[in-house]
Amino acid sequence: QVQLVESGGGSVQAGGSLRLSCAASGLTHSMYCMGWFRQAPGKEREEVAGIHRAAGSTYYADSVKGRFTISQDNAKNTLYLQMNNLKPEDTAMYYCAATVCISARALRPGLTYGYWGQGTQVTVSS
């Protein structure tokens, strides 16, 4: 069973940085898509970034391009989200997600993810 545990959230001022981590267990092979999502109170869940575990290909939401970087350390089974130049509108609960992706071409916005972490809160003050 895949389990995902996020960490690294916190409170920062606008312009600051945070790095989120997602420790994964139960990933028995490398053909997974991994993603970061966020949800602010009263808003729909938003897809932030995704990566194919084997191919390393990535995508980003327009709202975070140039500020956020998704990366991974497969040896440590850990997914990261480096967030720079944070803005108050980045305030949300951030979730890590995973799903089997046999092909790197399967990685795309809107992909349905089957495994989710519990989330880590990010608060950005102005």
Image: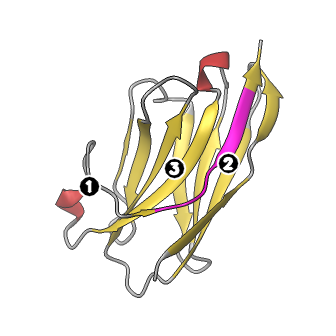
Q: Nearer the viewer, mark 1 or mark 2?
A: 2
- Name the residue located 70 percent from the left edge and 41 percent from the top edge: 121
Category of crowding for the residue at label 2, using alpha-carbon neighbours closer than 10 angstroms: few (below 14), some (14–19), many (at least 20): many
Q: Which residue is mark 1?
A: 107
> How far across and how far down the image is residue 17, in percent?
74, 34
Q: Amino acid at mark 2?
A: Thr
Q: Nearer the viewer, mark 2 or mark 3?
A: 2
Sequence order check, earlier mark of 2 and 3: 3
> How far across and how far down the image is residue 68, in percent?
55, 37
- Name the residue located 59 percent from the left edge and 43 percent from the top edge: 94
Secondary element under disc 2, as helix, strand or loop, is: strand
Q: Amino acid at mark 1?
A: Leu
Residue 120 numbered mark, or none:
2
Residue 83 numbered mark, or none:
none
Residue 121 belongs to magenta span:
yes
Between 49 and 37, the one lying in front of the other is 37
* Left or right, 89 with reference to 121: left
How many numbered callouts? 3
Q: Which residue is mark 3?
A: 70
Please determine whether, in this image, residue 110 is positioned above or below residue 76. Answer: above
Residue 118 belongs to magenta span:
yes
Sequence order check, earlier mark of 1 and 2: 1
Q: Amino acid at mark 3?
A: Ile
Please determine whether, in this image, residue 117 is positioned above or below residue 48. Answer: below
The C terminus lies in quadrant: top right
* Residues shaded magenta: 116-123
Sequence order check, earlier mark of 1 and 3: 3
